[in-house]
Image: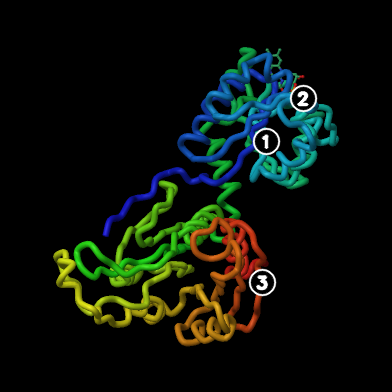
Amino acid sequence: MTKSKGNPLRLKGFKILLGLTGGIAIYKAADLVRRLTVDYGAEVQVVMTASAQKFMSPLVFEALSGKPVLTHLFSGGFVGTRHISLAKEADLILIAPASANIIAKTVHGIADDLLSTIILAGWHKMLFAPAMNVNMLENPATRTNIEKLMKRGVSIINPGEGLLACHDEGKGKMASVAEICEAVEAKLLGQGLLTGKKVVVTAGPTREKIDAVRYISNYSTGKMGLALAMEAKKEGAQVTLITGPVSLDIPRDIDTVKVESAREMLKALLNQAADYLYMSAAVEDIVPEEIIHRKLKKEFLPNVIPVKKAPDIVSAFRKKFPDTKITGFSVEIEQGKENSLYKMETKGLDFIIWNNPETEGAAFGHDTNEVTVFSREGKEWFLPKDTKRNIASRIIKITTGTGA
Ligand SMILES: Cc1cc2nc3c(=O)[nH]c(=O)nc-3n(C[C@H](O)[C@H](O)[C@H](O)COP(=O)(O)O)c2cc1C
């Protein structure tokens, strides 16, 4: 059993739209992009106003973010209704530095360039880091504008005091890159459905050895489990993924325990007290009665391999942790509902998710899935075909009681 420790890529999977406006503090934004992408693992799309481009070249931010910088409302590779889709796709719209001008435009709903139009469409997920001369900041117009934004629920990272670029002393310095990163993290993770919760996800198949080179296994690839782990992480949980042999690109920030057999998975799982367990691994039902620790020669292979039932992992976990909310998975072709409900009852699950491998684009190996969720209380949700990430997101909402 090998364990790889998580690292600080806490914002992996999040999309941040970073708006840059015309102020000297823009030089700090280069480091901000580097920190958000490299250290936090976020995807950053930079949008620059015309004034911002007078201070720094988009090239710097293209190199650091690894994406083209967007500058114009009506030109670029693809225009369409890009301003709307950019606002929709972003988990957060961060304006740093935020000029007095962009703050005023936001308050009045002015949309006369790409950035201000995106802001108008994505106003509910804004974070501003104002930066300006002390007199501009203390101007009643700016003060009132900032107050208005705050009253509307827009988050503001207060500027600090000190020697300003114009050599004046006072308030107006943009918050430090570290402070902005912390505010971004708090905004993205602090309000997650699973903030402060421990979530364990099992994924993939198990391999039950027959001899040194042969094993019994199944077609599970672990994609659904990984999608659940990534969505739980996005919702602010502390996540541990216990996975059988899979060839997936697991983000380094997800604490991962790699196991091979059902017995190893059981051992790993019983070490993990959790608020939520998503048991998406396809644990083999049968294991050879005895493992031959050398390679059996072909001519000595038995006609029959005696097998026994694999340990009942989820029942053992339930016995040890009676309070964990457990979501199990069932793979059923016939009488799916009846068999799933029976499994939920006998194993003490709170929810069960029925996959039908005969549905096109569902269950093993696909990037999509189509499932039905049943709860202990007798509720039922059909989740039509969608990406495994979107299905995972809906499963988390259902199992945390926050919607579907
Ligand atoms: C050298 C220089 C520095 C400036 N620094 C700031 C600043 O720190 N904050 C600010 O609000 N405006 C500052 N301005 C003024 C803005 O660039 C100007 O208001 C511009 O119209 C803002 O456009 P934007 O909000 O579309 O980026 C500065 C202007 C110059 C020439």
Q: Give whichever of discs 1 and 3 has the lower sequence position.
A: 1
Q: Which residue is mark 2?
A: 75
State the image coordinates of residue 195 (x, y, percent, origin top left): 53, 58
Q: Quadrant of ligand 1?
A: top right
| Color scheme of the displayed model | rainbow
State the image coordinates of residue 46 (x, y, percent, origin top left): 63, 30
Q: CA distance from mark 2 to mark 3?
A: 42 Å
Q: Which residue is mark 1?
A: 128
Q: Amino acid at mark 3?
A: Phe
In the depicted view, which residue is nearer to us: 310 or 146? 310
- Residue 339 horizontal side relative to residue 144, left or right: left
Q: Give whichever of discs 2 and 3 has the lower sequence position.
A: 2
- Residue 315 horizontal side relative to residue 301, left or right: right
Query: Residue 379 lies in what quarter of the image?
Result: bottom right
- In this rendering, the answer to whether 284 lies above or below 41 is below
- Residue 109 horizontal side relative to residue 275, left or right: right
Q: Which mark is residue 382?
A: 3
Query: Residue 45 lies in what quarter of the image?
Result: top right
Q: Amino acid at mark 2?
A: Ser
